[in-house]
Image: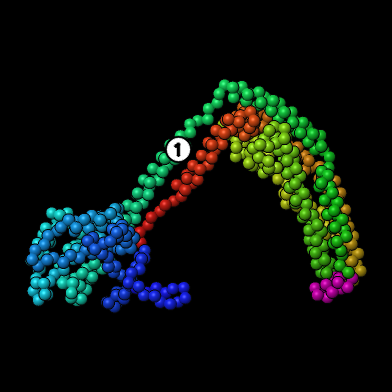
């Protein structure tokens, strides 16, 4: 055996320890594509560990197995090694009976073979096979020294059988494997259920309940006072302009005045020549002005969204800072409530609904401003604002320029004037959203019980110092349940076995 060393020198050795040797040679019969023959040792020829490798190869790499036996001319029988070899092969595919994918070839020898004729013993082995429970698809007698006979009586027989039955065998094996997987999934789910119950329920002592009731009553007083005060302040400010929005609106109007300019006279002349008339140049310029003025108000989107996010953060701050919930999560605004919603017990749906209402409302440019701005921007449309006739221009650049200047300033003035009535609306929306949250979370029937259920379930995290021992038990249970959730998700993944 040869092996190259690190310098590329080929070293020959009598023995070389390796994990596995695979020898390949071309199949002697041409035209037999997509077909391979694997020559495997018999039971008596195997070394240490070869039996398990034989089972692995049979189960993973072959579609049919051919057992070859050379009967002795002087007398033969099915011995223990023969039976053991069949039993070993049965272990390879427990879901598919061996008799559906195996053949026995009895190697026939003639009188001129050098060892004598074994034909009579071949026939005797054929007839005695059932009594030894040797069950295969077919038993074949063939002279294995004759390539043509092997081709015709063995190889062609096996290939023809696989062509006719291979797909069905694959489907049968896939169905059996799927059935075993389904049973395995059921067993896993049963173990998961047993594992989930092994830590028992989270009981509480009378002392813990007494401590909890005192802490919760104190928290409830702070919760109700804090949220009621916040709702009252928002109601007082509902009629006032929203300061952040007012600042951003002033900036947008300033940009619309200074950064959106009417075309220069030479540009108007160029447009008129390109479109054939000064009236056409006027219309094209109006479209451009209207679009650019509108663009200056698009950045108000983030201000509108933040106006409600700031209010949600005020509510979150009350819960985090005044009501001990910072130990559950330190997130802010909407993110705090989304995480809090995942902790709400199933028997506290009224609280989950209140959180959903608080988080679901948004102010956007398209939902709040777009349709309001559009009538005022129509001043810069060739058709004019609704109910008003558009300015008519003369056939010169000066007339178009003056008309554009007038309409540009008129549109901005109308928008500026309209905003005076709109600036308080974000405050009104904020007040209404918080008021509904307080209605559902504090004033509705069952709301206090919902908060109590939330605090009771997570008391060890909220009041860690007071429930230290319980907190340790809860942490163990939480880690255990998280580990079980990983197993559940893995067990829930589809396992589908298909044939060809």
- As for residue 429 lying within the magenta part, the answer is no
Is residue 266 one of those drawn in magenta? yes
Is 325 placed left or right of 493 in the picture? right
Residue drawn 89% across and 62% down? Answer: 405
The quarter of the picture where residue 84 lies is bottom left
At a point 87% along the width and 55% down the height, the residue shown is 254
Q: Is residue 99 visible?
A: no
Residue at horizontal 75 percent and vertical 51 percent from the top: 301
Counting from the top left corner in percent of width and height, residue 299 is at 77, 54
User: Residue 447, relative to residue 248: is it above or below?
Assistant: above
Where is residue 485 drawn, in percent x and y?
A: 50, 43
Front position in the image: 217 or 10: 10
Quarter that holds the N terminus: bottom left
Q: Secondary structure at mark 1?
A: helix
Q: How is the image coloured?
A: rainbow
Residue 189 visible to the viewer: yes
Residue 457 position by quadrant: top right
Q: Are there few (<14), some (14-19), or many (20+) residues within 10 Å of tag 1? A: some
Q: Position of residue 40 (x, y in %)?
A: 27, 65
416 with respect to 128 (left or right): right
Q: Which residues are magenta?
A: 265-278
Q: Name the foreground residue: 423 vs 285.
A: 423
Where does label 1 land, which residue? 195
Q: Residue at x 11, y 58 (%)?
A: 128
Give the answer, above or below, for where 298 lies relative to 424: below
User: Residue 496: percent from the left, percent from the top?
Assistant: 40, 53
In the rendered picture of this protein, how many numbered marks are placed on residues?
A: 1
> What type of secondary structure mainly makes up the magenta span?
helix
Q: Is residue 201 left or right of residue 79?
A: right
In which quadrant of the rendered view does residue 318 lie? Answer: top right
Quarter the C terminus occupies: bottom left
The one of 154 and 124 positioned closer to us in this rendering: 124
């Amino acid at each position: 055996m040869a092996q190259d060393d690190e310098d590329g020198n080929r070293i020959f050795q009598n023995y070389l320890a390796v994990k596995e040797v695979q020898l390949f040679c071309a199949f002697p019969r041409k035209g037999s594509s997509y077909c391979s023959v694997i020559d495997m040792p018999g039971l008596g020829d195997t070394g240490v560990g070869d039996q398990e490798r034989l089972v692995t190869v049979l189960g993973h790499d072959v579609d049919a197995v051919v057992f070859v036996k050379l009967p002795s001319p002087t007398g033969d029988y099915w011995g223990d090694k023969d039976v053991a070899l069949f039993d070993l092969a049965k272990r390879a595919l427990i879901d598919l009976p061996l008799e559906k994918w195996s053949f026995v070839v009895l190697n026939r020898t003639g009188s001129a073979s050098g060892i004598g004729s074994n034909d009579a013993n071949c026939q005797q082995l054929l007839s005695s096979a059932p009594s030894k429970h040797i069950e295969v698809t077919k038993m074949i007698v063939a002279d294995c020294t004759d390539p043509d006979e092997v081709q015709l009586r063995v190889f062609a027989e096996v290939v023809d059988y696989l062509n006719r039955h291979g797909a069905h065998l694959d489907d049968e094996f896939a169905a059996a494997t799927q059935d075993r997987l389904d049973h395995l999934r059921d067993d896993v789910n049963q173990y998961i259920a047993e594992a989930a119950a092994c830590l028992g329920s989270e009981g509480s002592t009378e002392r813990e309940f007494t401590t909890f009731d005192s802490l919760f009553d104190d928290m409830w007083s702070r919760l109700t006072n804090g949220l009621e005060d916040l709702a009252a302040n928002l109601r007082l400010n509902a009629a006032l302009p929203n300061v952040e929005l007012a600042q951003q609106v002033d900036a947008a109007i300033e940009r619309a005045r200074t950064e959106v300019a009417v075309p220069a006279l030479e540009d108007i002349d160029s447009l008129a020549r390109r479109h054939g008339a000064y009236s056409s140049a006027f219309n094209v310029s109006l479209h451009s002005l209207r679009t650019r003025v509108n663009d200056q108000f698009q950045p108000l989107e983030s201000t509108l969204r933040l106006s409600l996010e700031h209010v949600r953060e005020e509510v979150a701050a009350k819960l985090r800072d005044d009501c001990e919930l910072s130990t559950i999560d330190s997130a802010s605004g909407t993110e705090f409530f989304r995480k809090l919603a995942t902790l709400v017990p199933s028997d506290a749906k009224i609280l989950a609904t209140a959180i959903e209402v608080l988080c679901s409302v948004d102010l956007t440019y398209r939902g709040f401003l777009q349709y309001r701005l559009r009538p005022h921007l129509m001043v810069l449309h060739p058709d004019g604002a609704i109910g008003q006739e558009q300015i008519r221009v003369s056939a010169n650049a000066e007339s178009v320029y003056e008309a554009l200047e007038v309409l540009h300033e008129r549109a901005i003035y109308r928008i500026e004037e309209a905003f005076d009535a709109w600036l308080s609306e974000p405050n009104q929306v904020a007040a209404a959203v918080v008021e509904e949250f307080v209605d559902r979370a504090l004033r509705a029937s069952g709301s206090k019980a919902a908060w109590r259920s939330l605090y009771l379930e997570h008391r060890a995290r909220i009041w860690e110092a007071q429930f230290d021992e319980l907190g340790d038990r809860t942490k163990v249970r939480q880690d255990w349940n998280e580990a079980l959730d990983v197993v559940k998700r893995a067990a829930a993944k589809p396992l589908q076995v298909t044939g060809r």
